[in-house]
Image (cartoon, rainbow, N blue to C red):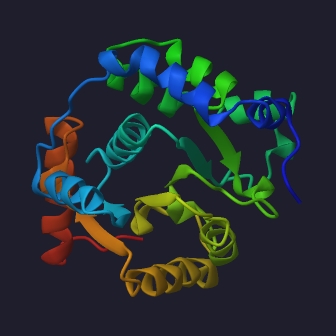
Amino acid sequence: MARKSNSKKALAGVSIEQTIDTLDQYSSNMRDIKPITPAQVEAYEQWNKGSNLILSGAPGSGKTFIALYLALQDLVKNRKKRLVIVRSVVPTRDIGFLPGTQEEKEAAYLTPYVGVVSEIFNNNPTLFTSFIKNGTIEFLTTSFIRGITLRDAVVVVDEFQNCNFHELDSIITRIGKRSRIIFSGDYYQTDFTNKKEKEGIAQFLRIIERLKTFKSVEFTWKDCVRSGLVKDYLMMKEKMTENKEIILP
């Protein structure tokens, strides 16, 4: 069933032309961000060739940042699309457990994107909220994605490792005409403990990796840009695992 909320109603009354006008106001403030690691370079190149993307791998490697940047860049260039951010709500898997209205519940999951959009547009912390209100950016959880078609959009599925097969299947079958999609996450950081659900994610990835319209980009500790500490930790974890000095749970 299609999601019914104040943000959805607002979006229904926003035309593509209004979204374009809003973007035009800020496009001059959008930073020209260059890729700085091999995996980031590959992601940029494949996106610019027209591929849909699977960005998977090490934490701190800029997967979410790149996904949102490429999506917003596409909005500015194509002048007709909106950005739709989709994610699951693990660990509860149902935001009904959180207090407040639906919008207040969702706000708990929006914090990372506020910072990313602010940084992309030269540190404007209020811009994300403005984009949400005028329909330039829409946030959906997998609980409310069935029964809708996402046309004229760039869809970013963030933290895809916390979506089960049925959620991922529902998301990709929502993609309509003139839309593109980016999956961002890390299979090995899933919050699932059930083996069947983990296998479902792997099966979904195997399916879309066979599609000519998708390119998979794998990020390793070498692509970590969060900090030197995180990079060193990831490198050491991989080294000790390979040498069988530790066995990860």
Identity of the residue furthest to the front in this view: 17
Looking at the image, which is closer to me, 142 or 136? 136
Picture quadrant of residue 122: top left
In the picture provided, is 8 more to the left or to the right than 43? right
Q: Position of residue 3 (x, y in %)?
A: 84, 48
Who's the residue at 60% across and 71% down the image? 193
Who's the residue at 87% across and 27% down the image? 100
Q: Position of residue 51 (x, y in %)?
A: 34, 66
Residue 109 appears anywhere in the view: no
Above or below 124: residue 104: below
Who's the residue at 32% across and 15% down the image? 29
Of the 4 image quadrants, the one containing the N terminus is bottom right
Above or below 116: residue 46: below
Of the 4 image quadrants, the one containing the C terminus is bottom left
In the picture provided, is 198 more to the left or to the right than 232? right
Who's the residue at 58% across and 63% down the image? 177
Q: Position of residue 142 (x, y in %)?
A: 71, 57
Q: Position of residue 201 (x, y in %)?
A: 53, 77
Picture quadrant of residue 211: bottom left
